[in-house]
């Protein structure tokens, strides 16, 4: 949906949450959870870049595995989630026919989450299913 830089001071940590949940944030009239995508995928925690994170905000009805504590597992209402990431290099639109099965040489930690891949401007981009 959207990419933002988020100041650490805008994140409200919440007790008793999984370690990958950084806290709650308010943006454009919505309050939503901010999640460390690297930790969610099984990698070491993300290091903030000074006093901020880069964040990808998504609207979903499906809660990522392991985050059931932040919302009901199945919901008819939209849920906004923010994923803190190391860096956003850009966004691309993908047509379903562009998606091919993933290579076998993907990092084993990522393999359960890679849905497929695309080739854009000579670069292979893995598509995550979180």
Image (spheres, grey):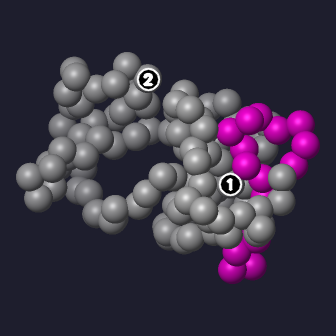
Image position of 73 (left or right of 129): right
Q: Is residue 10 visible?
A: yes
Q: Secondary structure at mark 1?
A: strand
Image position of 48 (left or right of 91): right
Determine which residue is flagged by label 1: 34
Q: Within 10 angstroms of label 2, few (less than 14), some, or many (20 or more) residues? A: few
Task: Please report the residue visible at 78 percent of the width from the left and 44 percent of the height from the top.
Answer: 70
Q: Within 10 angstroms of label 1, few (less than 14), some, or many (20 or more) residues? A: many
Determine which residue is flagged by label 2: 109
Q: Is residue 15 magenta?
A: yes
Image position of 93 (left or right of 86): left
Where is residue 116 drawn, in percent x and y? 28, 36
In primary-sequence order, the first of circles 1 and 2 is 1
Determine the CA span between mark 1 and mark 2.
21 Å
**Rendered position, 76 above or below 54:** above
Where is residue 78 drawn, in percent x and y? 66, 59
| Foreground residue among 52 and 28 | 52
Where is residue 31 drawn, in percent x and y? 77, 66
Task: Please report the residue visible at 72 percent of the width from the left and 55 percent of the height from the top.
Answer: 33
Q: Which residues are magenta?
A: 14-30
**Rendered position, 98 above or below 50:** above
């Amino acid at each position: 949906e959207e990419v933002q830089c988020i100041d650490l001071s805008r994140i409200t940590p919440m007790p008793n949450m999984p370690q990958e949940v950084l806290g709650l944030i308010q943006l454009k009239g919505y309050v939503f959870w901010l999640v460390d995508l690297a930790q969610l995928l099984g990698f070491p925690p993300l290091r903030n870049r000074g006093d901020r994170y880069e964040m990808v905000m998504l609207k979903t009805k499906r809660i990522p595995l392991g985050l059931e504590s932040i919302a009901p597992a199945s919901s008819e209402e939209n849920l906004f989630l923010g994923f803190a990431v190391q860096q956003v290099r850009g966004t691309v639109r993908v047509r379903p026919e562009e998606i091919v099965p993933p290579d076998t040489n993907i990092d084993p930690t990522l393999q359960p989450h890679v849905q497929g891949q695309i080739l854009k401007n000579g670069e292979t981009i893995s598509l995550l299913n979180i």
